[in-house]
Image (cartoon, rainbow, N blue to C red):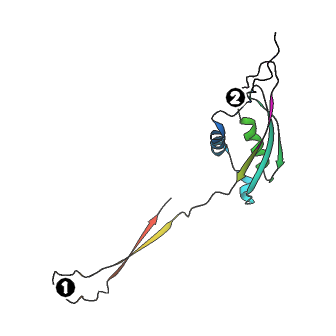
């Protein structure tokens, strides 16, 4: 068996679909921990992990965390990641990666929302433009939505 050529570039393992697909995967699979919701915790968790030549994630760890279950959720997400395999005959490839996951509290919408529209009736104007009469008619329309 011949030695690999040194001038050949390494093909490192990468996430299928690129960084946009990785971001979408995080959005789709992130579950805000109940304890973090109860304590209204927001912020960023940074995790580091290694990817071997076969695309498997190993050695996931938290570099900076928030606690309240957010760190464990990021570790769970990182362990779900699957990368493309590296094609480097005769070489062992391990890639070191970091990932930042933002936790932001969801916005709650009110259950019943009232919207008011104000309508002021204007008098009709004839073709000869007589002196307009003052109109004191005002209408308030209230719409209540249910969720």
Check the image and report above or below for 105 versus 134.
above
Which residue extends farthest top?
1
Q: Measured along the vertical axis of the image, is residue 105 above or below residue 47? A: below
Q: What segment carries the magenta color?
A: 84-98
Front position in the image: 43 or 29 = 43
Report, in whole angstroms, how far the alpha carbon at label 1 lies from the one at label 2.
78 Å
Residue 55 located left or right of residue 122? right
**Label at residue 129:** 1
Percent x, y of residue 133: 25, 89
Q: In the rendering, which numbered label is found on residue 9?
A: none
Dominant SS of magenta comes to loop
Q: Within 10 Å of the Cα at label 1, are there few (<14), some (14-19), or many (20+) other Cα atoms?
A: few
Disc 2 marks which residue? 84
Percent x, y of residue 17: 63, 35
Dot 1 lies on which element?
Answer: loop
Q: Is residue 58 magenta?
A: no
Q: Nearer the viewer, residue 87 or 6?
A: 6
Q: Examine the rendered structure and indicate whether residue 141 appears above or below residue 29.
A: below
Q: Is residue 33 visible?
A: no
Q: What residue is drawn where x is 73% and y is 27%?
A: 11
Question: Height in image: 102 above or below 1?
Answer: below
Pointer 1 or 2: first along the chain: 2
């Amino acid at each position: 068996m011949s030695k690999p050529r040194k001038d050949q570039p390494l093909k490192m393992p990468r996430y299928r679909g690129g960084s946009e697909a990785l971001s979408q995967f995080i959005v789709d699979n992130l579950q805000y921990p109940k304890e973090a919701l109860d304590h209204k915790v927001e912020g960023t968790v940074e995790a580091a992990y290694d990817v071997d030549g076969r695309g498997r994630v190993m050695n996931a760890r938290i570099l900076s965390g928030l606690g309240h279950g957010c760190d464990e959720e990021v570790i769970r997400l990182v362990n779900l990641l699957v990368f493309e395999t590296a094609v480097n005959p005769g070489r062992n490839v391990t890639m070191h990666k970091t990932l930042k996951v933002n936790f932001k509290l969801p916005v709650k919408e009110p259950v019943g929302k009232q919207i008011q529209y104000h309508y002021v009736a204007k008098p009709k104007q004839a073709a000869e433009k007589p002196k307009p009469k003052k109109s004191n008619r005002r209408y308030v329309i209230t719409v209540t939505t249910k969720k």
